[in-house]
Image: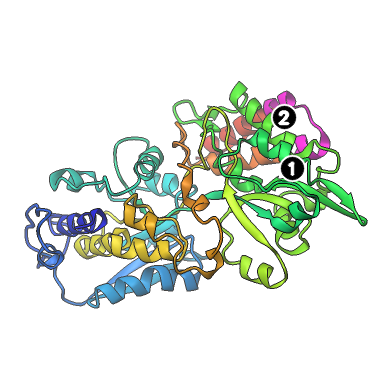
Amino acid sequence: MAKGSVALLAVAAMVGCAAGTGSEKSGDAQPQGKGQSEKADTASVSTEPVTLTIFNSSMGDDLMKSAIVDPIQKKYPFITLKVIKKEKGSLIEDLIAAGSVPDIIMGDSSGDIPVYKELDVLYDMTPLIKKLNFNLSSIDPAVIDEVRAYTGDSRILALPRGHNTAVLYYNKDIFDKFGAPYPKDGMTWDEAIDLSKKVTRMDGGVQYRGLDFSEHVLIPYNQLSLPVVDAATLKAAVNTEKWKSLFATLKRVYETPGAKPAAADYGGKASTLFLKDKTLAMLGSTLMFGALPDAVKNGLNWDVVTLPSFPEAPGTTIQMFSPFLAISPGSKYKDQAFLAIAHILSEEYQVAEAKLGRPSVLSTDRVKKEYGTENDLLKGKNKGALIKNKFAVARPSITKYDPAAYNIMRGKFKEVVLNDKDINTALREAEEAINKDLEQKKAAK
């Protein structure tokens, strides 16, 4: 039996043993052996019709339906999912006040887990995992490490349904136009910057730029796993040599004559320059399956390689970030809620996602082998680049204040790029601004 299926069986068994917390008809589950069938392992969970509420704070409506609701209800017809969308009047704080916290909580790992942890609306799965000897080995170790990093201890309060990654897209026509070699897997940032100089040209009145990246991804989820706030002291942790080195390397992307973007083209505009204008030769960014079809129709001749890495972290992409699934401690249907989450973690589901080009949380051979096989965009492309690099290790300190602190860091990096601000000055100012923000928030609390 595949490891992912074993994981599903183990989780299915787990849901039946949440003594006193699940359906009264669930009974007491016993640990199941790997030879047991899926049907036998799920027999301890009541199949009487049940409606589970699920809080969606991070996904679009259509994706939520196709990627979460429909697969679970198809697998388990006795489960009906009622989605509660995060909006005015139904924020998690509103639901807590009303005593109606959903059975399943879905959110964004980077911004929501620390907040929901503090609000005490995430159920600790660890005792059940230990009791039933749940085998986590089929799940990428980086995923589990990231979950525990957000928790701040050994608890597992949430599990991601998948993850995002970052790679280097490139426009083959620009490289052909200037007779330059294509990018390759395994480059360092210095090598990518050197290559970008060959295709940063003014030609026919058009300024072609060699390289840019999505700074809203590569700074908060940086490949060196650098923190912004020390969780122990709640002080800024950015005025360091490592942050200085990261800023200095990424600044070099823009130092070649003609490589610095106009203020209007900085940041989010980079994807437009690559996808639509076709004047950017290389773009470091996350998956762009939603935008690439139209770009291809409009003549973009693209391919992809692994994201350039730093010498101190070779073969490393960004830190993991993903929508996560968790269970409310007050749910009356923990058994069934866990069964639903188990299906999202099963190899059956994860392989289906991998075929579409969505990186899996599993590290099994099957999900790697079948990655991208049903995504027409990836036919003839270097699709292995999207899953080749390992994730950056979880940063050592994660707090609910991180998103605001990273926004400050992004603002200071923008000043370094566009205004030639000294990096030491930028980091000192960032530290001061982050500490001021922390003090204000602590005082308000």
Could you tell me which secondary element the residue under label 1 belongs to? helix
Residue at image coords 33%, 52%: 365
* Residue 412 visible somewhere in the drawing: no
Under mark 2, the amino acid is Ala
Where's residue 437, x and y in %? Answer: 61, 36
For this orientation, the residue located farthest to the top is 241
Main secondary structure of the magenta stretch: helix
Q: Residues within 10 Å of mark 2 (few under 14, many from 20)?
A: many
The one of 65 and 249 positioned closer to us in this rendering: 249
Where's residue 348, x and y in %? Answer: 29, 65
Which residue, given by chain and number where applicable, does mark 2 sit on?
426
Residue at mark 1 to residue at mark 2: CA–CA distance: 26 Å
* Residue 22 visible somewhere in the drawing: yes
Under mark 1, the amino acid is Ser
What's drawn in magenta, residue-wise? Answer: 413-428
Residue 418 covered by magenta stretch: yes
Which of the 4 image quadrants contains residue 200?
A: top right
Which of the 4 image quadrants contains residue 340?
A: bottom left
User: What's the mark number on residue 196?
Assistant: 1
